[in-house]
Image (cartoon, rainbow, N blue to C red):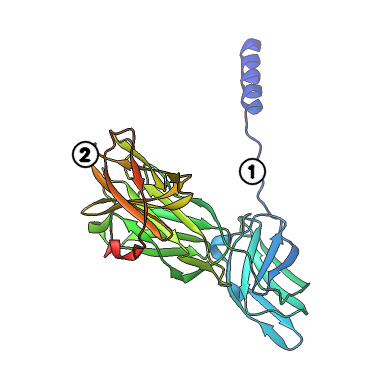
Amino acid sequence: MRKSWFLVLALAMITCAHKAPPLVKDRMKPKLQNIIALNNIQLQFTFSEDIDTLNLSADNFHITTGEDTLRIKSLYPSLSAAEIVAITGLQMDAEYEVAGYVFDTAQNKGAFVERFTGTSKPDTIAPWIIKYSKGRNQNQFYFHFSEAMDTTFFEFLLFPEKNIVTQWPNLRVCYLVPTDTFNNFAFDTTYYIYINQGCRDLSGNFFGTIVTNITPDTTFEFFILKGSANINDTLVKTGLAVLKRKIPLGITLIDGGDFQFEVRDSLPYTVEVFSGKYSGSKVLSPTDSLNIIDLKLEEKDFDNIFN
């Protein structure tokens, strides 16, 4: 009997030793720690913890100076989940008061009333891309910008051509989505996107140039078509190269005189190169080790090659 009681006691101790500690629910309310006027239309709010950014509402914020109200047009997450940025009407160099509330990720409500100094200084910094889609196993293009963008102004070129539209889950993130299943990106194809001064932020600052490519394939066989472009036996510094077979199939930037494309077969392709007022074209093969295109002073309308 004594031995049986000992076994029961030992089993109970082992069970208790492995019991997980009780879960502690987050009951701390988020607190507003800082407000900074980034420029005359943007405010950055920093909180003590991560905020529920999926359910942000401009109606939960009220900004005043004297008897005037500063309208908030939009709210979006900043680089940290504890920071949000407000797009406002034009600010003045004046003291403002903001009253409002947010929820943290545990849905604790944090109310605040704070003062800050606005600014009439405009935004003159060009936006840049923090991350974007590139490479294999990608079914759509996306771009994550450094700040809020003008979603009404977004221009790009897609090769090979598909009907796609832009979708903005917030003012900093853009997805390029096929209009229907017929226009879905196909396997065994590499798609290229070219943007050149085709998008701008809310203050009218233009983004620069980017070329990126994706393919839905997880693994695929491809060839690399490499080449270079010369002007009077000198490598061109910058320019664009367009890959063609009856229609444009790809586009890339020239870097230090060189260019390259991912292609799906070893047959010849036509490559057309543009650099300022110079241009040139040549039929090239991925199997050739020496692909050189000599450019001449022959200015062409870049847009015409896609029409």
Q: Distance between the residues labelled 2 and 1?
A: 64 Å
Question: Which mark is drawn over residue 267?
Answer: 2
Residue 55 is at least partly visible in this image? yes
Residue 171, percent from left and from top: 52, 66
Dot 2: few (<14), some (14–19), or many (≥20) neighbours within 10 Å? few
Quadrant of the rendering where the N terminus is positioned: top right
At label 1, the amino acid type is Leu
**Residue sitting at x 39%, y 64%:** 166
In the rendered image, the vertical position of residue 213 relative to residue 178, given as above or below: above
Nearest the eye: 214 or 282: 282
Q: Mark 1 points at which residue?
A: 23
Residue 226, percent from left and from top: 36, 39
Residue 271 is at least partly visible in this image? no
Q: Which of marks 2 and 1 is nearer the N terminus?
A: 1
Residue 303 placement, left or right of 76: left
Nearest the eye: 256 or 121: 256
Counting labels gives 2
**Residue sitting at x 65%, y 14%:** 6
Q: Nearer the viewer, mark 2 or mark 1?
A: 2
